[in-house]
Image (cartoon, coloured by chain):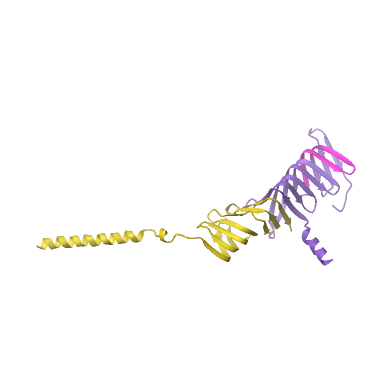
Amino acid sequence: MINFFIKRINLLVIFFLAIQIFIYFYNQRPLSENFSQKNITVENFSSIVLSKSGITKIGSEKLNKIDEDNIYLEGNSYLENKEYKIYGENIFIKLKEEISNSNEPVKVINSMGVLKSEGFKNLDNEGIIIFKGEVEFLID
Amino acid sequence: MVFTLFFFSTSYSDSYVKASDTLIWDSENRKYTANGDVEFKNDKFIAYSDKMIANYIEENNEEIFTVVELFENVVIEFKDETFKGNHAIYTKDDNIIILTGDVSIESPTRLLTGYELIADIDNNKRILNSADKDSLVEVLLENDSNN
């Protein structure tokens, strides 16, 4: 009789342990499917981005977050850091690669002067900016 | 009158770089590379070429070109002289331009050709070498204190 109760108690303990283990592993599962990012649009936006080259301030009439790594600055936009100020329109930013580019006219101010071009590609982590098309760089 | 002065002051600059294709600013290596119908002007001369690489330094939070290298179809206009060549290198420290490859100097009174031209702007001196190193032509110009 006692053995019967002991077996029952053991079964109950095993059952509750199984439930605990199930609850534990269920809570460990990632919940990304419930929080997948949707496109976000913000108007008159400005923010600060930290990258290898330091702090860059960005702003635009309309910011469109395409996904986790891609931002589209729509309308009049700017990028500013300790080395340059870039004023342009419709600028794409790849956050992970630290690349920004635009095919619209752009004006850049740095410590040497004022530069105007028909577009640009900024490889920020390499310290290289490629200005496209007709370029005019007036040196102070 | 005020408007005219304002317009003139904003549209004119002592120094500039213009290009028709690209201008690449490499801030890590401190240089600018211009491609396509390049036009470079400083307070000494105006230069044209297919490509230009200009190195700079930073002094007192300002960037200053120290060495300017020009490639292909190089034309440099300095006062009433025109220098032509395939390659040119200008160093700001000594204000010397060295042109190589089918070099010519053209002025209102003469045309000289050779392989290498060393133009010392501060001392108003031109040295023109031919391709054959044994022959040397040196042209001395009258000193001009306005240089």
Where residue A90 appears, as percent x and y from the top left, is 61, 58
Within the magenta stretch, is there residue B55?
Answer: no
Give the image quarter of residue A23: bottom left
User: Which secondary structure dominates the residues rendered in magenta?
Assistant: strand
Where residue B33 appears, as percent x and y from the top left, is 68, 48
Res. B119 visible in picture: yes
Colour in which chain B is shown? purple
Where residue B72 appears, as percent x and y from the top left, is 73, 41
Which chain is painted in yellow? A
Q: Is residue A21 left or right of residue A50?
A: left
Give the image quarter of residue A10: bottom left
Q: Quadrant of the N terminus of chain A?
A: bottom left
Camera-nearest residue between B28 and A137: A137
Q: In this view, does A12 lie to the left or right of B20?
A: left
Res. A80 visible in picture: no
Query: In the displayed structure, would residue A26 be above or below residue B35?
Result: below
In the image, which residues are magenta?
B95-116
